[in-house]
Image (tube, rainbow, N blue to C red):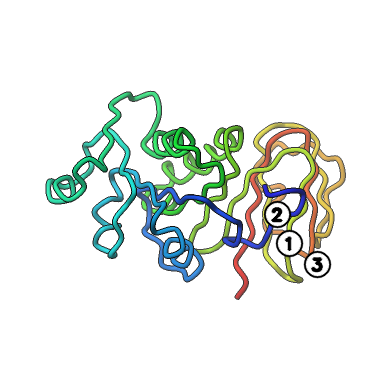
Amino acid sequence: MYGNIIVRPGCAPFEALVLADGNFPTHPVPLAIMARLRDHLLCCDGAADALMSAGFMPEVVVGDGDSISPQARERLGNRLVVLREQENNDLTKTVHYAVAQGYRRLCILGATGKREDHTLGNISLLADYMDMADVEMCTDHGALTPVTGDAAFESYPGQQISVFCLEPLPLTLHGLRWPVTNRTLTRWWQASLNEATGNIFRVETAGKAIVFREYPS
């Protein structure tokens, strides 16, 4: 979150990009972010081959070292950081590494697709990452942003919006077609498939939530 207003999906002033080993981005928005941050690109080891095949050289590749080809390993040299502890997945290891290097505004790409369990797990991790950095996860469909407290988002009429509560605490939504007023939601679907009615919508919650916004067409 960048001040009280959170900018359009994919347009935040990111300092670095973290690429996970899900579906490699194909949408123009994440591809533009990747091009813009090509000198500050940190990669999970399972995504290194796909990244270099796309013409990028990562600043660093982080992981347990078991998902990278010998050819990529040789090209990377000392850019490969092997962390064999198993308490965290490779995405979390890479985010921790980025924060340790001083990056505080992170975009995560490639965190969805391939397997639903990996997708759900990676999305849920945004609730942990928001405690250490401003973070947004961009997919080929839209952006996922973790929030707590009061937050305002730039939007446009008809933009598809979903809000997923991670804690059973009251939620209020303003500026959406179906507003929510001080409700405690117990299932993820209950604030999904909504849409913006104007140029700004607001989220108020005492807990943590993840807001999905589709990209402009």
Check the image and report above or below for 134 versus 57: above
The residue labelled by disc 2 is 6
Rendered-image quadrant of the C terminus: bottom right
| Residue lying at 68% horizontally and 59% vertically, measured from the top left | 7
Image quadrant where residue 131 sits: top right
| Dot 2 amino acid type | Ile
> Where is residue 176 drawn, in percent x and y?
80, 60
Give neighbour class at mark 3: few <14, some 14-19, many 20+ (Cα, 10 Å): some
| Residue lying at 22% horizontally and 40% vertically, measured from the top left | 78
Check the image and report above or below for 131 versus 178: above
First in sequence, mark 3 or 2: give its number.
Answer: 2
The residue labelled by disc 1 is 154
| Dot 3 amino acid type | Thr
Give the left or right position of residue 205, taking residue 26 as reference: right
Give the left or right position of residue 41, taking residue 189 as reference: left
> Where is residue 43 drawn, in percent x and y?
35, 47
Give the left or right position of residue 98, taking residue 153 as reference: left
| Residue lying at 34% horizontally and 25% vertically, measured from the top left | 86
Q: Which mark is residue 197?
A: 3
**SS state under label 3:** loop
Q: Are marks 1 and 3 in contact (CB under 8 Å)?
A: no
Q: Nearest to the eye among marks 1 and 3: give it.
A: 1
> Where is residue 102 drawn, in percent x and y?
50, 38
| Residue lying at 56% horizontally and 33% vertically, measured from the top left | 128
Q: Are marks 2 and 1 in contact (CB under 8 Å)?
A: yes
Name the residue nearer the viewer: 44 or 99.
Answer: 99
Image quadrant where residue 212 sits: bottom right
Check the image and report above or below for 80 versus 161: above
